[in-house]
Image (tube, coloured by chain):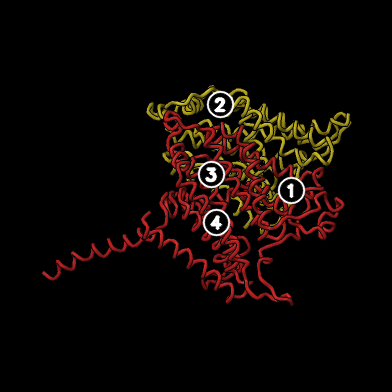
């Protein structure tokens, strides 16, 4: 049973990646943009928690963090991506990299370059024992909460009007614009939802860590993006499956001993290269044909 | 380019090199100016190599840091003096490689190693389109970083420990018997190396291969229909770019005096990409100018923002550690959003154009004066 802690950690981390990956996959589905700043927004949510948890009570801090992160994601889209709506895709991607650089540097300035201690959250950070393995309660909460949120999101996309608009925009940007769909509203809602889920993911993810530095978001962000690509970009169930797979496999590699730990991050990218070489559209991605 | 323009360019370049040489003899070696010149030259080379891919071939690759990593390590591994190896590889019994090669050969080897890695990576990666290529090359760079930190490879790469004590730029200085520096060359030599490399890239861009690269950038399908072997030309561009990124990595190692794999993160690639954007995607001279401006602003001119006083304004509560980078990032965002073409667009710096602009300025004024006399 020596693998139980690793499997538990894998499922838990997988759920957290899934919450970030949805932000990537939805934005890519609609704007065809790799939002490189998404990982940094995730990190910013962690920092907000640090600064808000101390003066406020936890039950006030958590909703505020989620709200502020959603607003941050919305603001980034309005300030940095909207002006480039008709620009070449490469320009928007460069803008995303610029935002990532900006958010990291602002975080560096605010924290003064010091690693900030993440507050210990009552109840969800408590230690519990499952199948003989001691772990934090967050490990169990994460997969459950992830599934609940994703079911909610899928209902939103399938049943509501804004969900229908989102599906239309991701199918054909130009035509849906002509059909009278308010494209900017749809994009803003997408960023709000993506950042909101990233904030929830951040609360769960950083509960397992003691401190945050400005680059804490980069690696989970990249991994979540790989998860989105693996599952087929634009597909929400695909992103979730990809995320759980990456979370599990990286923790299984960690169980192999210290000399393999260095590869736990790299394996994600090996997986990416394999899927891109074998099935570039991912597990559930739609096949795209290039028009001349 | 006419013969006259060529002569002017050569004279200008010669003046730049002469100025670097003279400044180095006159100004104390610790001056911030030399930090900017050395690091700026290195980043200029890497930015031009990235521009060859992104600006001239239209391949959005984000693997530059990985190839620099290979270059830096190959240089370090082959140049650490044998008598120093026991102290550098202290956890790995002095390492397995017990010979050294001359510095210039090691720099070339660094490029060759990066080029070989690029050739292998190119096979799966270059078949991908735009952003998938970006994310795949970024992934390869991360994998390379993990491999170089693997402790099973420690006897060669020193695992996650530093590589150090290899020859640096200061070893180019000519010293007398007492060890005092007679002639400073620590900035001029990297400038020369970078200059030769960029000259080679320019030759490639202006050759028939360069025209094919631009055809691929402008319309891949049209190029293919004209009989261009897409994959072969993308591979050439990728390999050449990585070769020079490897050399840039070796030079960066010489500049920094130590090598550690964890420094070659994707953040480094992003910085180089931003330099390319500032200079103008598709402009070699733009990348060079952009690089010196980027390094000068981030390392030197904006320093005051970190230490309390900037442009005579003292505000220690706002101007504290890290503010420089915030301001810098905002400037970059402004360039990215509002000056998307960068400094040079896709044009090259030329004396003729500047002269022409002045001439037009005066010509416009001339008729107005005539009108006044009537």
- Residue under pointer 2: A156
Residue B345 located left or right of residue B92: left
What number is the disc on residue B196? 4
- State the CA–CA distance, disc 3 to disc 2: 27 Å
Residue B224 located left or right of residue A59: left
Q: Residue at x 47, y 46 (%)?
A: B205
Query: Tag 2, which secondary structure?
Result: helix
Q: Residue at x 52, y 42 (%)?
A: A93
Q: Residues within 10 Å of mark 4 (few under 14, many from 20)?
A: few
Chain identity of mark 1 = A
Q: Residues within 10 Å of mark 3 (few under 14, many from 20)?
A: many
- State the CA–CA distance, disc 2 to disc 4: 59 Å
Which of the two residues, B164 or B292, is positioned nearer the viewer here?
Answer: B164
Which of the two residues, A218 or B172, is positioned nearer the viewer here?
Answer: B172
- State the CA–CA distance, disc 1 to disc 3: 30 Å
Shown colour of chain B: red
Decide: marks 2, 4 in contact (CB < 8 A)? no
Foreground label between 1 and 4: 4
Query: Tag 4, which secondary structure?
Result: helix
Foreground label between 3 and 4: 4
Decide: marks 1, 4 in contact (CB < 8 A)? no
- Residue under pointer 3: A96
- State the CA–CA distance, disc 1 to disc 4: 54 Å
- Residue under pointer 1: A119
Specify which label sits upstream in the sequence, 1 or 3. Answer: 3
* Chain yellow in the figure, letter: A
Q: Are marks 2 and 4 on the same chain?
A: no
Decide: marks 2, 1 in contact (CB < 8 A)? no
Instruction: Examine the rendered structure and indicate whether residue B188 appears above or below residue B69.
Output: below
Q: Most extreme residue toward the left, as rendered?
A: B374
Where is residue B270? Give x, y as percent: 58, 48
Foreground label between 2 and 4: 4
């Amino acid at each position: 049973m020596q693998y139980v802690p690793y499997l538990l950690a894998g499922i838990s981390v997988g759920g957290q990646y899934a919450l970030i990956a949805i932000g990537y996959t939805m934005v890519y589905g609609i704007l065809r943009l790799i939002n490189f700043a998404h990982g940094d927004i995730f990190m910013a949510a962690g920092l907000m928690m640090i600064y808000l948890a101390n003066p406020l009570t936890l039950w006030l801090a958590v909703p505020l963090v989620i709200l502020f992160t959603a607003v941050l994601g919305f603001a980034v889209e309005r300030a940095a991506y909207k002006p480039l709506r008709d620009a070449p895709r490469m320009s928007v991607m460069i803008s995303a990299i610029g935002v990532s650089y900006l958010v990291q540097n602002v975080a560096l300035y605010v924290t003064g370059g010091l690693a900030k201690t993440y507050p210990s959250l009552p109840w969800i950070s408590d230690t519990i024992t499952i199948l003989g393995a001691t772990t934090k309660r967050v490990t169990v909460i994460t997969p459950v909460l992830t599934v609940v949120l994703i079911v909610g999101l899928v209902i939103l996309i399938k049943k509501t009007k804004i969900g229908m608009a989102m599906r239309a925009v991701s199918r054909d940007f130009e035509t849906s614009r002509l059909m009278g769909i308010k494209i900017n509203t749809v994009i803003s809602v997408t960023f709000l939802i993506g950042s909101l889920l990233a904030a929830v993911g951040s609360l769960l993810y950083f509960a397992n860590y003691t401190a945050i530095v400005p680059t804490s978001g980069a690696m989970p962000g990249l991994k979540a993006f790989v998860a989105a690509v693996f599952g087929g970009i634009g597909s929400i169930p695909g992103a979730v499956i990809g995320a759980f797979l990456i979370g599990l496999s990286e923790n299984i590699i960690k169980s192999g001993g210290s000399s393999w730990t260095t590869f736990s991050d790299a394996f994600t990218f090996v997986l990416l290269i394999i899927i891109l070489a074998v099935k570039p559209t991912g597990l559930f991605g739609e096949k795209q044909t290039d028009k001349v | 380019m006419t013969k006259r323009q060529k002569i002017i360019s050569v004279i200008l370049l010669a003046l730049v090199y002469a100025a670097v040489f003279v400044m180095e003899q006159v100004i104390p070696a610790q001056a911030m100016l030399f930090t900017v010149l050395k690091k700026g030259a290195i980043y200029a080379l890497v930015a031009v190599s990235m521009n060859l891919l992104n600006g001239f071939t239209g391949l959005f690759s984000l693997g530059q840091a990985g190839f620099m990593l290979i270059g830096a390590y190959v240089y370090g591994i082959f140049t650490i003096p044998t008598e120093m190896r026991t102290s550098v590889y202290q956890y790995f019994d002095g390492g397995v490689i017990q010979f050294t090669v001359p510095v210039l050969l090691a720099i070339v080897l660094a490029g060759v190693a990066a080029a070989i890695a690029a050739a292998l990576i190119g096979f799966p990666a270059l078949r991908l389109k735009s952003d998938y290529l970006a994310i795949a090359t970024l992934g390869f760079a991360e994998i390379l970083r993990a491999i170089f930190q693997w402790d099973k490879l420690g006897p060669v790469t020193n695992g996650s420990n530093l590589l150090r004590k290899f020859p640096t730029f200061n070893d180019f200085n000519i010293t007398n018997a007492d060890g005092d520096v007679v002639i400073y060359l620590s900035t001029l030599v990297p400038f020369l190396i970078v200059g030769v490399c960029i000259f080679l890239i320019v030759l490639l861009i202006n050759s028939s291969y360069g025209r094919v690269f631009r055809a691929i950038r402008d319309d891949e399908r049209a190029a293919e229909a004209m009989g261009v072997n897409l994959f072969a030309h993308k591979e050439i561009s990728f390999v050449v770019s990585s070769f020079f990124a490897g050399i840039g990595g070796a030079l960066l190692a010489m500049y920094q005096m130590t090598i550690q794999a964890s420094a070659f993160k994707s953040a480094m690639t992003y910085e180089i990409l931003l330099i390319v954007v500032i200079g103008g995607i598709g402009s070699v001279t733009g990348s060079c100018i952009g690089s010196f401006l980027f390094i000068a602003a981030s390392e030197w001119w904006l320093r005051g923002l970190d230490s309390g006083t900037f442009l005579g304004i003292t505000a220690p509560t706002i101007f504290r550690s890290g503010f420089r980078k915030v301001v810098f990032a905002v400037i970059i965002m402004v360039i990215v959003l509002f000056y998307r073409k960068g400094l040079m667009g896709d044009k090259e710096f030329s004396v003729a154009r500047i002269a022409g602009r002045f001439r037009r300025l005066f010509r416009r004024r001339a008729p107005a004066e005539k009108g006044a006399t009537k």
